[in-house]
Image (tube, rainbow, N blue to C red):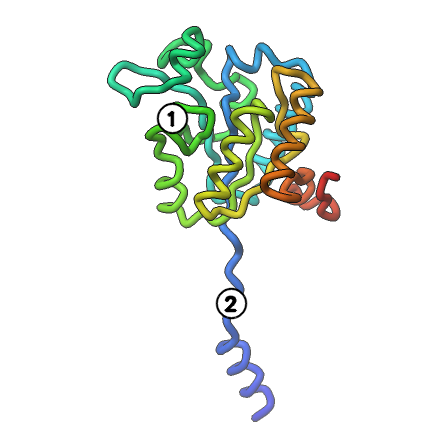
Amino acid sequence: MRRILFLLWAMWAMPVAQAIRRALVVVDMTVEQVANISFQKDKMIQTIRELAQSGTFDALIDSHLWFEKGGPPSSLAEMFPHIGHAGTPGAELIPELRDLGLEFVKKYQYSCFAGGADLESHLHKLGIEEVVITGINTDYCVMATALDSFYNMFQTRVVESGVSSFNGKAGHLEGLKSIRRFLGNIVVGPEEYLQTGPVTIQA
């Protein structure tokens, strides 16, 4: 009896391991921007869908360009004057991802965190510790978002099959190369979150 009571006490006193809180951040997957993607577009969309439906994320974030009157000034709005106009059909999330319950956080610069965006504060309010990045473009906004995520002290991952570039395979691979150069081996396969097999760090 004493042994049973001791075991019960030990189980009660043992600290409970806290699961890490994760956010899936989907970058710039809008109608007008995804239209320029050819390299692994279908695979990217399918990966994002599978991740969002996996049940392993505490937040699902849609972060894409949203330039509106009275919003923060943006150098990107001047550089790319034909995209990201608030309320236009082209600036909306692609239909293939609209049923996933993604929460929209406005984006103003290459990085989802920069230029007056609310992403950092929003993630902190949710207690997020790890940011998992998907979307476009690997060599521009995905890379910039990964750098700022790291800078803001989040554990950061980029899902290789969940990102692409309008610069095709060459731009995609160049983006992954730069991410690894600055942030180390943070590029992962989706199975880390889909729980379908062993984790793979993409070489």
Residue 1 in view here: no
Residues 57 and 86: in front is 86
The residue that appears at 71% across and 47% down in the rendered structure is: 199
- Residue 179 quadrant: top right
Q: Residue furthest toward the front? A: 181
> Where residue 102 appears, x then y in whole percent?
46, 30
As displayed, is residue 121 above or below residue 10?
A: above
Residue 53 sits in quarter: top right
| Image point (51%, 42%), residue name | 131
| Location of residue 72 with respect to 15 vertically, above or below | above
Q: Amino acid at mark 2?
A: Val
Which amino acid type corresponds to the residue marked 1 in the rendered image?
Answer: Lys
Name the residue rendered at 44%, 11% in the picture: 80
The percent position of residue 28, horizontal first and vertical second, equals 50, 22
Q: Which mark is residue 106?
A: 1
- Residue beneath disc 2: 16
17 lies above or below 57: below
- In the rendered image, the residue lying farthest to the top is 82
Q: Is 21 located above or below residue 110 in the figure?
A: below
Is residue 74 something one can see in this rendering?
yes
